[in-house]
Image (spheres, grey):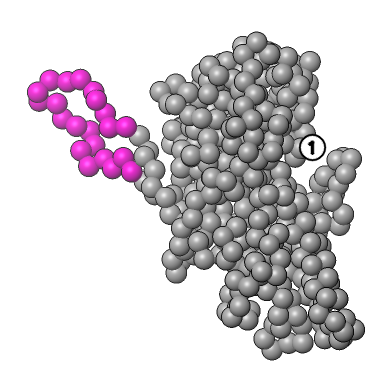
């Protein structure tokens, strides 16, 4: 099973009956109902736009506030032409997953029911692969080893997981620009010796400091960031993590919410979640009617003083066990091309003959990117563990 992430033009497929896939197999167009909590939350808050001919997403953001400096009547403004707005640009990832058969296979299935069973089996497999890769992408870095066929070996990356996926790869990702962004890539600040560019905005320890999330590193833990390459400024390893206490979380949220009223989702691994249950027992709020409850996520607790909800995602346990990532769904979201969005019944090709060949196939096709229009609306705690 390979999830292909490649530039395939829509007109290379016979798309005459593309919307018929919903009648063929409804499961395919609802991937968010079968994936991990974080992906489901992002799907729930997805925004849609129509890509232009340049194949880019654009988004306006405020870079800084106008100066309210005090002065006398003869005050001369240093930058009278200052424009407080800038525009982000994202080149989206184009992800598709396809499976097919040939004339011989179809001829051996000499009844409509046999063919439909075969089709449904293929769609099930394709859907599961897409789901696994999508959930993995949300917490991955971009430095995984590229195999000979230009693919990230997800099975190897999740080998410590007691139930890793079987022979799963993310194909055609020889460059990090061919991959969707992840929370660790969005929620990173500029560290000493680092500096990175996100959505054409350069961020260093002195440049565009407003374009940085709030990061709290444990003072005792040994936290090693990547200092070069695609993952620059992303935390690479954490040694000697320390148990988190309530003061740690309070100081963390103070960093994010000064002057802002963010509603934060905080994704943690299993160990930290158990620690939080003990710490927040006196102020716990379990709200089954919340968006998390609607998604079937029963393991969530709220920190009412800071308008924050903690939940656990299995991917965090295996990829970032000593970290907490906070994000606001109004400011960090999936942005999808409205014409190629599987969750809306578009971007789906039904089981039919591919023009110019003897293959019959179906495919899920999605043009999307993980976007943030205010990096201060999120943050990360690194170097913390349960007691």
Name the spot of residue 218 as percent of width and height, x first.
67, 19
341 horizontally vs 221: left or right: left
Instruction: Check disc 1 and report the residue beneath it.
Output: 318
Q: Is residue 386 left or right of residue 38?
A: right
Magenta: predominant secondary structure element? loop
Rendered location of residue 44, percent (x, y) = 57, 46
Position of the N terminus, as image quadrant, is: bottom right
Residue shown at 82% from the left, 86% from the top: 103
Query: Which residues make up the magenta segment?
Result: 65-85
Of the pair 79 and 142, the residue shown nearer to us: 142
Name which quarter of the figure residue 303 lies in.
top right
Q: Secondary structure at mark 1?
A: helix
- Location of residue 77 in the rendering, given as x and y in whole percent from the top left corner: 19, 32
Q: Nearer the viewer, residue 187 or 369?
A: 369
User: Is 22 situated left or right of 161 in this image?
Assistant: left
Q: Is residue 272 above or below residue 22?
A: above
The furthest residue to the left = 73
Can the viewer see residue 325 in this picture? no
Q: Residue at x 39, y 43 (%)?
A: 61
Please name whichever residue, 74 or 386, is drawn nearer the observer in this view of the structure: 386
Tell me if residue 67 is in the magenta stretch: yes
Compared to residue 308, the image places residue 190 above or below, namely below
Residue occupying the point 49% across, 55% down: 48
Q: Is residue 166 magenta?
A: no
């Amino acid at each position: 099973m390979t999830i292909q992430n490649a530039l395939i033009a829509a007109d290379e497929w016979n798309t005459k009956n593309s919307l018929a896939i919903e009648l063929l197999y409804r499961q395919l167009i609802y991937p968010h109902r079968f994936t991990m909590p974080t992906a489901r939350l992002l799907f729930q808050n997805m925004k849609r736009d129509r890509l232009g001919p340049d194949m880019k997403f654009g988004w306006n953001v405020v870079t800084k506030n106008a100066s309210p400096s005090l002065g006398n009547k003869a005050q001369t403004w240093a930058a009278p032409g200052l424009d407080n707005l800038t525009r982000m640009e994202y080149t989206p990832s184009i992800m598709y997953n396809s499976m097919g058969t040939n004339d011989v296979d179809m001829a051996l299935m000499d009844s409509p029911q046999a063919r439909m069973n075969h089709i449904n089996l293929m769609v099930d497999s394709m859907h599961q692969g897409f789901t696994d890769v999508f959930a993995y992408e949300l917490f991955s870095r971009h430095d995984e080893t590229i195999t000979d066929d230009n693919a990230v070996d997800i099975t190897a990356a999740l080998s410590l997981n007691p139930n890793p996926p079987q022979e799963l790869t993310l194909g055609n990702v020889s460059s990090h620009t061919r991959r969707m962004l992840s929370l660790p890539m969005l929620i990173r600040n500029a560290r000493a010796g680092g500096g990175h560019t996100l959505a054409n905005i350069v961020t260093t320890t002195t440049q565009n400091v407003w374009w940085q999330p709030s990061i709290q590193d444990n003072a005792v833990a040994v936290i090693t960031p990547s200092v070069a390459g695609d993952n620059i400024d992303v935390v690479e390893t954490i040694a000697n993590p320390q148990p988190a206490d309530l003061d740690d979380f309070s100081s963390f949220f103070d960093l994010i919410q000064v002057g802002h009223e963010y509603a934060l989702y905080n994704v943690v691994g299993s160990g930290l979640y158990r620690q939080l249950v003990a710490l927040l027992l006196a102020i716990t709020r379990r709200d089954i009617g919340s968006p998390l409850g609607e998604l079937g996520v029963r393991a969530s607790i709220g920190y009412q003083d800071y308008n924050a909800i903690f939940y656990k995602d299995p991917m965090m346990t295996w990829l970032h066990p000593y970290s907490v990532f906070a994000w606001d769904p109004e400011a960090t979201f999936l942005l999808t091309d409205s014409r190629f969005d599987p969750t809306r019944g578009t971007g789906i090709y039904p089981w039919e003959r591919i023009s110019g060949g003897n293959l019959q196939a179906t495919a899920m096709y999605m043009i999307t990117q993980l976007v943030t229009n205010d990096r201060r609306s999120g943050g990360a705690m690194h170097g913390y563990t349960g007691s």
